Image: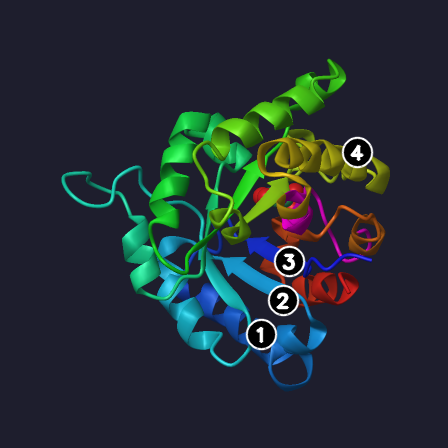
Amino acid sequence: FSARRPVIAGNWKLNPKSIAEASQLLKLLHANFVNHRTPAQLDVEVVVFPPFPFLLEALLVLQGSGIKVGAQNVALQTSGAYTGEVSAPMVRSIGVDYVMLGHSERRAIFGESDADINKKLHLCLAEPGLGVILCVGETEDEYESKLLASVCDVQIRKGLKGVSISDLSRIIIAYEPVWAIGTGKVATPEQAQVAHTVIRNTLTDMYGYQAADSVRIQYGGSVNPENVDSLMSMPDVDGALVGGASLTADAFTRIVDGAI
Ligand code: PEP
């Protein structure tokens, strides 16, 4: 038995192409969740992460559905001469509940370091009510070199540097092995459990057993309606971070149903 509330998140990445398509997806999600299927009734927390231009539409359309809205990134600064950036206070001011940080695409394609991620995380924690999903995970080479444990340990320690035990409750960890993201090559439930145990052990070392035991750790990487149930049956898998399958309302809804 775990007291940790399951959390399912949908990472839309750079999709869909237009506000019309985004709005359609949001309306379908709203229809699936409102009334008989609200996340509160299911006792599962549900969050979607659309691109910035669709955040306000998501907040409007999802009203009454219980689905929360998150931003996929924030700037390293809060305001000023940083053309093209979007800050943590800005997204919080429109009603966004979560920010995703440290996604492997941000690390690999946009060169974000653990220090950058940690700085962004502190800017998010400075905004009352804003939560963070901190993504960690090893590459295929690292996995094959048996570096999973050391890579995840370092990413957690550096990512959470300076985070107080009281702020830890605002943070969700997403374990996303890079080799499983967008590849259809899902980790086995046992592989996920091993990695989540590594992460929880690091958290225990940093914050003590009780605090570490209450942190939710999601698995991410090719989650779909067929495999979510077996992944979620693992004692330390507390949810899923879903990419591709979150772009279809029915698949995402079935994943939430499978998480219970
Ligand atoms: C992700 O982008 O975080 C992800 C897990 O993608 P996918 O589900 O498509 O593998």
Marks 4 and 1, Cα distance to the nearest angstrom?
36 Å
Please give the label number shown on residue 15: none
Label 2, secondary structure: give it: helix
Span of residues in magenta: 212-227
* Residue 249, disc: 2
- Residue at 55 percent across and 77 percent down: it is 65
Give the residue at mark 4: 194
- The local secondary structure at tag 3 comes to strand
Q: Distance between the residues labelled 2 and 4?
A: 31 Å
**Dot 1: element:** helix
Which quadrant would residue 220 be assigned to in this image? top right
Residue corresponding to mark 1: 28
Where does the image place residue 104, in percent across and percent down from the top left?
Answer: 54, 33
Q: Which of marks 1 and 2 is nearer the N terminus?
A: 1
Mark 3 is on which residue type?
Answer: Ile
Q: Do the residues labelled 2 and 3 touch (CB within 8 Å)?
A: no
Q: Is residue 71 magenta?
A: no
Q: What residue type is labelled 2?
A: Ala
Query: Which residue is at 19% across, 40% downward?
Result: 83
**Is disc 3 surrounded by few (<14), some (14 to 19) or many (20+) residues within 10 Å?**
many
Q: Position of residue 74 (x, y in %)?
A: 36, 45
Q: Which of marks 3 and 4 is nearer the N terminus?
A: 3
Tell me if 66 is positioned left or right of 254 in this view. left
Q: Say which of marks 2 and 4 sits in front.
A: 4
- Distance, label 3 to label 4, CA atoms, is 20 Å
Quadrant for the N terminus, please. bottom right
Please name the residue that numbered disc 3 is placed on: 8
**Real-space Cα distance between discs 2 and 3?**
13 Å
Rendered position, 17 above or below 256: above
Q: Does the magenta stretch include residue 225?
A: yes
Contact flag, marks 1 and 2 (Cβ < 8 Å): yes
Q: Is residue 253 above or below residue 113?
A: below
